[in-house]
Image (spheres, rainbow, N blue to C red):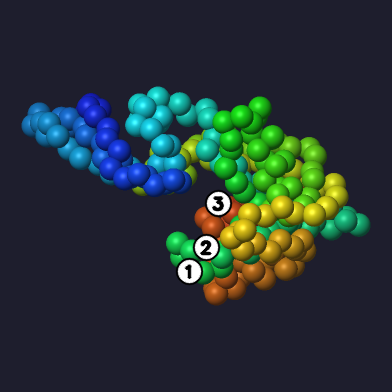
Amino acid sequence: MKWKFKTSKKDTDHPFLNLYVVEYEVTKDDGSIRPDFPYFVASRNQKDEELRINKQDFKRADAVLVGAYTIKDGQLFLLLERQFRPALNHDVISFPAGLCDKEDKDITTAALRELKEETGYIATDFEMIVPPSPTSEGLSDECNAVVICRLLSQGKDNKEEFEDISAKLYSVEEVKALLADENVIFSNSARLLVLYLLERFKNK
């Protein structure tokens, strides 16, 4: 099939997330044409012209996931968060994460800030292992990055009023127990990142 983008229109007006209605002309393989195929897109962008469907900007990250770790006495520990997610009415296990600001110099700047705000930790040796990439392309135009970093020290966090987050260093054995517990919900990206870090540092 051949898809030709035609229009996009903002359908809601909320402060953090909005619904857009986009329209395509679709030419099917048999040559028939649907001139006005509608699709619905959720986006953090506040203006129609900022949608990726219009800008085609896939190098800018909307948010970053921070795979923070430390090694103590030869043992790996991962910094995981347990956070209540209102959209699920349930706690979810993940890594520190947060939105990238337009003023951020780079993704590392955002990662440092979000790590410090949510957990109080500072870190070094930042490495981007996933560049800005679609996270839910059937629903949203959001593109997120994934970095890993080594923890240095912990100070005081600076969470927002309704960020219900508890952060803790977990040993490999504790992490594996969480993964095996069917009652524990991991975010998709966090589960994959945990498995990546366990494999990467298994011989350290």
**Which amino acid, by three-letter code, is at mark 2?**
Arg
Which element carries disc 2, helix, strand or loop? strand
Looking at the image, which is closer to me, 32 or 125? 125
Cα gap from disc 3 to disc 2, whole angstroms: 15 Å
Residue that badge 3 annotates: 189
Residue that badge 2 annotates: 85
Compared to residue 15, the image places residue 36 above or below, namely above
Tags 3 and 1 touching, CB below 8 Å: no
**Which amino acid, by three-letter code, is at mark 1?**
Asn
Q: Sequence-wise, which precedes: disc 3 or disc 1?
A: 1
- Residue drawn at x 59%, y 35% is 101
Which element carries disc 3, helix, strand or loop? helix
Tags 2 and 1 touching, CB below 8 Å: yes
Residue that badge 1 annotates: 89
* Category of crowding for the residue at label 1, using alpha-carbon neighbours closer than 10 angstroms: few (below 14), some (14–19), many (at least 20): few
Cα gap from disc 3 to disc 1, whole angstroms: 19 Å
